[in-house]
Amino acid sequence: MSALTATAAPASAAQTRRMREAATRAAWFVSPFLVLIALWAIIVPLAGVSPRTFPSIGAVVTTLGETLADGTLLTNTGVSLMRVLVGAGLAMLIGIPFGILMGMSKAVSGFFEPLLRFSVALAGIAWIPIATLAFGYGEGAVIFIVFNAVFFAIVYQTLLGVRQIPISLLRAARSNGASPLRMFFEVYLPGAMPGIAVGARTGMGFAWRGLIAAEIIATSLGLGYTLFLARQYYETDVMILVMIVIGVLWLIMDRLVLVPIERRTIQRWGGQQGVDR
């Protein structure tokens, strides 16, 4: 056996092992959903549940095909995704620098932290009445609610991330003459990244909750509005389909985007542990 073959064999075995482990994790992740679907398929027909109370799997699958064919599901999903991304993006754009500023200055932190703690309980759907009065019924109100739901989570976690930066690192940077601007970009921002990653993941979960509540009340398009409209006409198949779509969108966003970002951030800069594997 040549040296090249001997080197390739362990590499191939390691790759096969990683693929097997990934497949095992994926199967374990999917298994509770398969159990839930099986229970759904068995219990609903056996119990004789009325379609007005809870739909069958077949009814939901049929509705999925119909709403994909006429484009309504894709349209409402696209609108809701846009609102989430715009509202959450603005919240992070403003919230991350603000959280770092609070961590950098005891005076700023001392002034704003009580307001921050007070507002956490009011973030999200509690602002819907004010949002509709200020922005009317439409995009502005919904995006404001999403922004509000994410902003406080990202500010708070960013502040915690800054406070976890070792004092020795801050003293070393200052003793070397780092300006406040360099401290912000080269010390505080990288040091706060683990907290920012956690805040982004937490905030995006809040964003979906706020979005659905706001769309039910403040707009006439989107997944939340579809859910509300289906309730008025006892279309339980549509209601369950929309709930499934929302859950799947969040799982895709969380598992394929947010979890890898959080894991890589923590691996690079350290910080809080316990990221889902």
Image: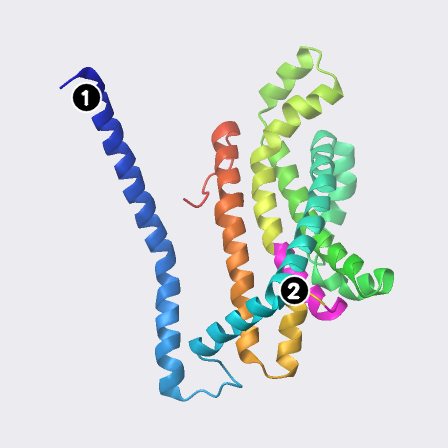
SS of the residue under disc 2 = helix
* In this rendering, position of residue 219 left or right of residue 189: right
Main secondary structure found in the magenta portion: helix
> What amino acid is found at the position of numbered circle 2 in the picture?
Ile
Query: What residue lies at 63% left-to-right and 83% top-to-bottom?
Result: 233
* In this rendering, position of residue 5 left or right of residue 108: left
Compared with 147, 194 (above or below) is above
Q: Earlier in the sequence, mark 1 or mark 2?
A: 1
Instruction: Provide the residue designation for mark 1.
Output: 6
Instruction: Provide the residue designation for mark 2.
Output: 212
Compared with 154, 217 (above or below) is below
| Quadrant including the N terminus | top left
Residue 144, magenta (yes or no): no
Q: Could you say where residue 146 lies in the image, as x and y percent from the top left?
A: 70, 55
Residue 217, magenta (yes or no): yes
Q: Could you say where residue 225 lies in the image, as x and y percent from the top left?
A: 68, 70
Report the front residue among 156 and 118.
156
Q: Could you say where residue 22 lies in the image, as x and y percent from the top left?
A: 34, 44
Report the front residue among 176 and 27.
27
> What amino acid is found at the position of numbered circle 1 in the picture?
Ala
Specify start and end residues of the magenta stretch as a single range: 206-220
Q: How crowded is mark 1: few (under 14 residues within 10 Å), some or many (20 or more)?
A: few
Judged from this view, the residue extending furthest toward the left is 1
Q: Residues within 10 Å of mark 2 (few under 14, many from 20)?
A: many
Judged from this view, the residue extending furthest toward the right is 134
